[in-house]
Amino acid sequence: MLAAEYPIRVICDVVECARSSYYHRATPSEERDVQGAIEAVAAAWPRYGYRRVTHQLRREGWEINHKRVARIMQERGLQVHRKPKRRTTTDSTHAFPRYPNLVEQLEIVRPEQVWVSDITYIGLREEFV
């Protein structure tokens, strides 16, 4: 072994690699175990996104990063598909009077003979009115 005869710095300079590469000890990959744990949490809690799955895994004792959970969930197709919020803009069961359509039977013969508008809702900054 060369490390007994030469300093590590010299050996790494000759081989052209960093000294940290010599001292690095690779840990066995636990990717399958992590994937299984993520799939188990996603199966138990189907509405959980990557943030909640990460917190649940940490509660179970895993030391895991949210970015890794997000990546694995994306690879496995385990993301939560949220339905978009649908705004209700018309309430037909109100007590207000309904006005008749005054131009329904009118015969229109020229441009700009009739102007019509209907305000169903008005979008304000915080809400719809």
Image (cartoon, rainbow, N blue to C red):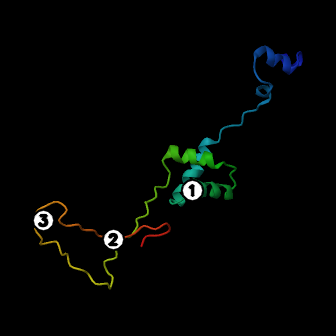
Q: Amino acid at mark 3?
A: Ile
Residue under the image location 57 percent in, 56 percent down: 41
Give the distance between the C-alpha atoms of the residues marked 3 and 1, in whole angstroms. 65 Å
Give the distance between the C-alpha atoms of the residues marked 1 and 2, in whole angstroms. 44 Å
> Where in the figure is residue 103, as x and y percent of width and height?
17, 72
Give the distance between the C-alpha atoms of the residues marked 3 and 2, in whole angstroms. 24 Å
Binning the other alpha carbons within 10 Å of mark 2 as few (below 14), some (14 to 19) or many (20 upward) gives few
Binning the other alpha carbons within 10 Å of mark 3 as few (below 14), some (14 to 19) or many (20 upward) gives few
Q: Which residue corresponds to mark 3?
A: 108
> Where in the figure is residue 60, as x and y percent of width and height?
67, 57
Q: Which residue corresponds to mark 2?
A: 120
Q: Considering depth in this image, is 39 or 102 the residue closer to the camera?
A: 102
Which image quadrant: the N terminus?
Answer: top right
Q: Earlier in the sequence, mark 3 or mark 1?
A: 1
Q: Considering depth in this image, is 85 or 114 the residue closer to the camera?
A: 114
Q: Earlier in the sequence, mark 1 or mark 2?
A: 1
Q: Please tell me in which quadrant of the rendered image residue 52 appears.
A: bottom right
The mark total stands at 3
Which of pointers 3 and 2 indicates the residue nearer the eye? 3
Q: Please tell me in which quadrant of the rendered image residue 122 appears.
A: bottom left
> Where in the figure is residue 9, as x and y percent of width and height?
85, 20
Residue under the image location 46 percent in, 68 percent down: 124
